[in-house]
């Protein structure tokens, strides 16, 4: 359907992955399998080891930092909210998906 050069262009591959509803993991595994077909020598062996590890090993446990340490839900912060830490006051500029501040601007208030 496409020429080989166009078919393997990163933007085309990304658009086709979105069109067919492939997850990022499935898209990565497909690209890894294409790499195995294309490469030779140590690069091929490394790609095969990575593919085997990703496909056939149990999922890695989340780190201790990611595990909640209490049953109470973590406090969620909002952008522009005033916060105090170590005696300093600041305004939340950005938060992550869990509502934790990722950027705080120093405030004189």
Image (spheres, rainbow, N blue to C red):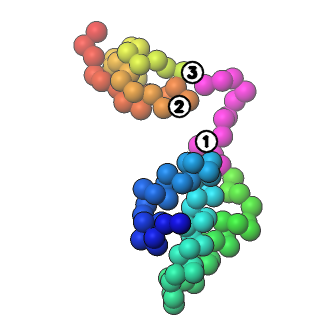
Circle nearer the N terminus (3, 1): 1
Name the spot of residue 60 as percent of width and height, x first.
68, 57
Q: Of all residues shown, which one is farthest toward the bottom?
A: 41
Q: Of discs 1 and 2, which sits in the foreground?
A: 2
Circle nearer the N terminus (3, 2): 3
Circle nearer the N terminus (1, 2): 1
The residue tagged with tag 3: helix, strand or loop? loop
Q: Are marks 3 and 2 in contact (CB under 8 Å)?
A: no
Alpha carbons under labels 3 and 2: distance apart: 12 Å
Q: Are marks 3 and 1 in contact (CB under 8 Å)?
A: no
Crowding around mark 2 (Cα neighbors within 10 Å: few <14, some 14 to 19, many 20+) is few
Q: Which residues are magenta?
A: 62-74
User: Looking at the magenta stretch, what is its main secondary structure?
Assistant: loop
Reply above or below: 68 against 24. above
On residue 97, the disc is: 2
Q: What residue sits right under mark 3 in the picture?
A: 75
Which quarter of the rendering shows the C terminus? top left
The residue tagged with tag 1: helix, strand or loop? loop
Name the spot of residue 47 as percent of width and height, x first.
56, 76
């Amino acid at each position: 359907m496409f020429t080989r050069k166009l078919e393997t262009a990163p933007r085309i591959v990304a658009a086709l992955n979105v069109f067919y509803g492939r997850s990022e993991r499935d898209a990565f595994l497909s690209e890894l399998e294409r790499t195995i077909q294309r490469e030779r020598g140590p690069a091929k062996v490394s790609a095969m080891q990575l593919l085997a590890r990703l496909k056939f090993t149990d999922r890695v446990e989340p780190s201790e930092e990611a595990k909640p340490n209490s049953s109470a839900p973590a406090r969620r912060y909002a952008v522009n909210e005033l916060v105090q830490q170590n005696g300093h006051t600041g305004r939340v500029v950005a938060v992550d998906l869990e509502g934790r501040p990722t950027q705080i601007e120093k405030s004189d208030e």
